[in-house]
Amino acid sequence: MVSTLDNAPPSAQRPLLGMTQAELTEWVQTQGQPAYRGKQLHQWIYGKGVRSLADITVFPKTWRQTTEQIAVGRSAIHHRSIAPDQTVKFLLRLEDDHIIETVGMPTEKRLTVCVSSQVGCPMACDFCATGKGGFIRNLATHEIVDQVLTVQEEFDQRVSNIVFMGMGEPLINAQNVVAAVKCLNQDIGIGQRSITVSTVGIPGQIRRLAQHHLQITLAVSLHTSNQALRTQLIPSAQQYPLSELLDECREYVSVTGRRVTFEYILLAGLNDCPEHAAELASLLRGFQSHVNLIPYNPISEVDYQRPSRRRVNQFTDALKTAGIAVSVRYSRGLEKDAACGQLRASKI
Ligand code: SAH
């Protein structure tokens, strides 16, 4: 059974992190405080990153003492690992002691956070380290938002971009992911257009996500234009034919007006040949989309191979020639702990 912190008994205090200013205002009033303390609380939680109400010095001392036990909802940093390119991988410890991975990736102009949406992942994609470790539970909204605040504090720099490409499948935790997106946007001030949600595709969920009319970027892990190979790489694709996945993506474009990104892991000899590029180009012809090629990051459990740079360039050029918008993503922070999810696997 999937357990989430949202399933906590109704008497339990919902963590304050993840609440809007209006909700915090309502909450302070239930505590017998004036409404303006809601705005102060909002500022201290999201702006100053306070971890305990006892530290909010603008609050009366007696109230601070009585609210000391109220959960703000911040996670603890369990481990940090800094790569030579300044990427920092964090392992965060949740309230129930489960560990998740979050990555901060700085460039000259940006600070991007790769957030997790679940503890582990149930999709079991064959090339993915997280998928090999099994699934534990969905993350609650505050546990997603916390990851961004933590990276912001650790880098002492505003986060500019967020990608839901850490552990987990965001669209099986859509309710909390959408709530987190809204909180990151409205309460922390990160533009929706700077937020990307990456999904392997869950039947009906892309259509449902479109109905929220968010301006986020939807990235779909396509990886191949061949249904048989896709099922081999992504077991859940068995119940979700490519044609249905693409129909939902088309609907997403028409409802939101946002083009879809298709992620495509390049696996040497399997899906990186010129005929695969031609097949992909023909599948996506006329589709308002962008292809993001990801040269495979080797994981120890399987023996797929990463193609050479020459091969990656040939594939990229073939797509460009066919009129497909394409970019290549070389993963960051690889020097030390290899692929995503491997740091966690090595530390727990
Ligand atoms: N479940 C979501 C988001 C998490 S994975 C999804 O599948 O999209 C984020 C991206 O990293 C996905 O495109 C995924 O396919 C890719 N990925 C996973 N393992 C990888 C590996 N070993 N090498 C390269 N990309 C990988």
Image (cartoon, rainbow, N blue to C red):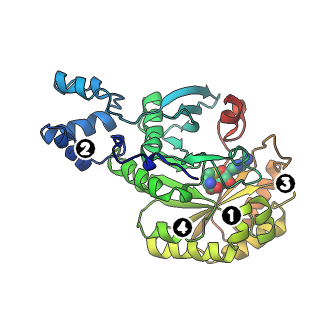
- Circle 1/circle 2 CB separation < 8 Å: no
Instruction: Give the residue at mark 2.
Output: 24
- Residue type, mark 3 in image: Ala
Q: Marks 1 and 2: which is nearer the front?
A: 2
Q: Earlier in the sequence, mark 2 or mark 4?
A: 2
Q: Tell me which corner region of the image, top left, top right, bottom left or bottom right, holds residue 247.
A: bottom right
Q: Tell me which corner region of the image, top left, top right, bottom left or bottom right, holds residue 24.
A: top left
Side (left or right) of 13 relative to 342: left
Of residue 77 and residue 14, the one placed in the foreground of this image is 14
- Residue type, mark 1 in image: Leu
Instruction: Give the residue at mark 3.
Output: 268
User: Residue placed at 23% from the left, 26% from the top?
Assistant: 66
Instruction: Give the residue at mark 4.
Output: 205
- Element marked by disc 3: loop
Of residue 14 and residue 128, the one placed in the foreground of this image is 14
Q: Earlier in the sequence, mark 1 or mark 2?
A: 2
Instruction: Give the residue at mark 1.
Output: 222
Can you see residue 297? yes
- Residue type, mark 4 in image: Gln
> Taking 341 as reference, is 318 above or below it?
below
Q: Marks 3 and 4: which is nearer the front?
A: 4
